[in-house]
Image (cartoon, rainbow, N blue to C red):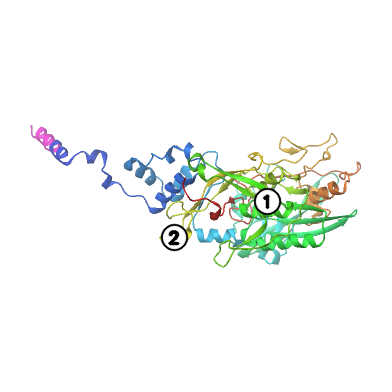
Amino acid sequence: MKNLRLIWVLLLVLMIGGCDLFTGSDDEIKEPTAEKKFMWNAMNYWYYWQGEVDELDDEFNDDKSKFYNYLNNNSDAEELFESLRHPEDDFSFFIDDYEEFQDEQDGVYAALGFNYGFIRISQTEYMGYVRYVIPNTPAEEAGFKRLDLFTEVDGNTITENNYLDLLTSDSNHELTMVHLERTEDDFTIVEDSTVSVNSEEVVEDPVLKTEVIDTAGVSIGYISYNAFRDNYHSRLNEVFGEFQSQNIDDLVLDLRYNGGGSVLTSQLLASLISGLGSNDKYATLAYNEKRSERSRDLYFLDEVPLKDEDDEFNNSEPINNLSLSTVYILVSRSTASASEAVINSLKPYMDVTIIGLKTVGKDEGSLTLYDTSPPYLDDSDANPDHKKAIQPIVTKIINSQGSDYPDGFAPDGYVNGECAENADGSDVVDNCINEITVDNLIERPALGSPDEPLFSRAIDLIIGQTAKQKQATETRLPTLREIEIKNGVQDLRPNGNGMYIEPFMVPTDEK
C-alpha cells in the first residue's frame, strides 16, 4: 500500500511539472555552436544540391528540438559539414582557418616546393615522382629535378596503404632517390642517395615556364601554367605580351598540372588566347533552383582586371591578346575545373586540340562562405570568435552552346581509360599520350623541351609532321600506371583542384 501511494505521488509531481522530463523543453536543449549554425545556414542558402539533401530542407529547422539535436549530434562543425554533403559531391571542402586559406589561394603556403605524383611499378611496388620544381624553394635547393624518382619517405617504403600520408607540406622529409636503367628487355631500379628537403613558406608563380620554338618556319609559343590565381593577372598578361612581340604563329598551353582556381582568371586566359571580348559569351554560371535568380552569363574580357591595395578589382590594364584560331592544350588526369572551363568555353569559337590523358571532369564552381549575414560572402564582417569557413559547390559552369563537362575531356585515341595501342604494342598515332613511361623516366626531358612527349606531339601537329614511331628493332619499354587519387591533385598545393567565383561576380540582390 505504501508503494502504491509513492507511485501516485510521483505521478502527481509529473502532472504538475508537465511532460518536459519525457520530451525535453526547448530551454533544456543545448544551443549549437555558432560555427555549426553558420554551417547549416550557409549550406541551406547556397549549396548546389540543397534541394536533394533532406537535412538542408527549408523546413528542417522549423522544429527547434529536432534541428538542435541534429546539429549537436555532430561532434564539430567539420563533421556537420561532411554530413550535409550530397553523395555526388566530390569537391566541396571545409576550411579550418580562412586567413590561411586566402594566402593559399594567392600562392603562399607551407610547402616543400615540388609537385609530385605516385606510380605503380608492380602489384606491390610503388614510387613517387617529381612533376615539377618551383624555383627558389627548398626542393630546388635540395637539387630536385623534374621526373626525379623516390621510393622511400623518412625511411618508410612507399606502399598502397601509406602513399597519401607520407609526404606532408608542413614537415621536413628525407627521400630515398632512385633512377631507372635499361636491361636487355626491361628495366631495373637503382638506388642513389637520401636527400633531405625542408618545409618553408613558398610563393608560387603560376607561370612555371615559357618558351618560343622556331621550327620548320613556324614560331610556336609554349606556356606551362599551373594555377588560376587572380593576383597574377598582370604577370599572365606580360607573358602574352612577350608572345605578341615575338609574333608567334601557334600556342601550346600546358595545363597538365593545373587543378583550377579563379573563374575570373580563366576568363582572362581564354580572352588572351582568343582575342574575344565583352560581346562574346564565355559561360553561364547556373545555380540551384533556390538561387536560380542569381544565374548569370559571363563574357570574355576587353581588358585585364587587376586588384588594388584593398584586394578589390578596381584597376585594369590593356590586354595583350593573340587572336588565335587554334590552340593546343596539354592535359592529364590532374587537369581540372578552371582549366577545363577554358577548354569548354573556347570550343565554340576555335579549334581546341587536346593532347595527353583524359581530364578530371569538374564542371562545378564554389564560393568561400564566412560566418556573417547572408549571403555569407563578406569576410570583413565575419564572426571574430572563430576562423571557420566552407567552400561548397554552388554552381555549374556551362559554355555558350549549353555544354558542361562532367566526364572531362579526352584526347583522340583514348579508349576505355587508356591510350589505344597497335597490334605490335606501339602507340596508335593520335593525341593520347602518357608521360609516365620508362623511356621518359630514363630520358627525363624538361618541360618546354621539343623532346618532351606531349609538347613534341603538339609541334608535330603544328608543322604537319606525322608522329614519331619507335624503330621496330628497338625494345619498347612499358608505360607505367600513375595512381589516380580521388578528389583531384595530390601535390604541393592545398585544395589544388578548386574552381571558385569572386564575390563581386555574384549578384546579391533578390528578385
Residue 137, percent from left and from top? 67, 65
Residue 334 appears in view: no
Please say whether residue 365 is visible from this viewpoint.
yes
How many other residues sit within 10 Å of disc 1, few (<14), some (14-19) or many (≥20)?
many
Which SS class for mark 1? Answer: strand
Say if the magenta span includes residue 158.
no
Q: Quadrant of residue 56?
A: top left
Label placed on residue 117: 1
| Residue 174: quadrant of the picture | bottom right
Q: In which quarter of the image is the N terminus?
A: top left
**Image position, residue 432 (x, y; %):** 77, 42
Residue 224, position as x, y percentages in the image:
73, 56
From the viewer's side, name the closer residue of 440 and 267: 267
Residue 57 vs 108, above or below: the answer is: above
For badge 2, the amino acid type reads Asp
Which stretch is magenta? 1-10
Residue 86 on image: x %, y % = 51, 40
Q: Name the residue under label 2.
A: 381
Q: In the rendering, which numbered label is found on residue 444?
A: none
